[in-house]
Image (cartoon, rainbow, N blue to C red):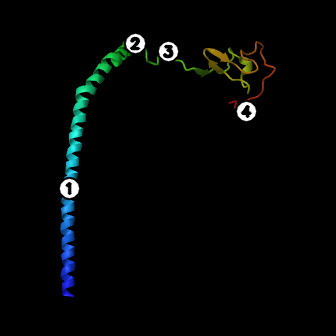
Amino acid sequence: MEEFSQGFFAAVEAAFIEFDKFLKVAGEELQAMADELEKASDEVTQELQERIIPGLDEYFAEIIEPVLDVYFNLDLDLTNEGFEPFVSYVHPSRTQNPACQGCSNYHGQVYGGNLLVCAIHPTGVEAETCPDWEQSIYQV
């Protein structure tokens, strides 16, 4: 039985020695691959710096800079002075559309400078009263 134990331990020790050799060779191979990747990365970086980046500078100088020059030389008034919204509301009053006061049909929106009084009478009525007047439930 002692011979079996000695043989077993010798086989296990040989297996560990072989596994250690395998790990060393695999480590050396991985290091070689990492070195090659580093070299390739350096070559790509150098290629970018020598060929592509100068080309981008040329592209920027020829295409982008003129566009930016035009944009920055435009005399744009970006302040809100004189800004009118596209749609605004006009309340009926004693002087403007008096027959529409309190009417549920009244729209009162201004579109492109034109007041839409209501769908029935787009420009309002000339008379003091409107034949289509209906009490608004939202009247204050």
Question: SS at mark 1?
Answer: helix
Q: Label 1 to label 3, Cα distance in Å?
A: 74 Å
Name the side, left or right, on which 65 lies relative to 128. left
x 26%, y 30%: residue: 48
Badge nearest the viewer, 4 or 2 = 2
x 22%, y 47%: residue: 34
x 64%, y 14%: residue: 114
In the picture of the structure, the residue carrying the numbered disc 2 is 74
Q: Is the residue under label 2 in contact with that under label 4 (CB below 8 Å)?
A: no
Looking at the rendering, which quadrant does residue 94 occupy? Answer: top right
In the picture of the structure, the residue carrying the numbered disc 3 is 82
Q: Amino acid at mark 1?
A: Gly
Q: Position of residue 69 (x, y in %)?
A: 35, 14
Q: Earlier in the sequence, mark 2 or mark 3?
A: 2
Q: Amino acid at mark 2?
A: Leu
In the picture of the structure, the residue carrying the numbered disc 1 is 27
In the picture of the structure, the residue carrying the numbered disc 4 is 137
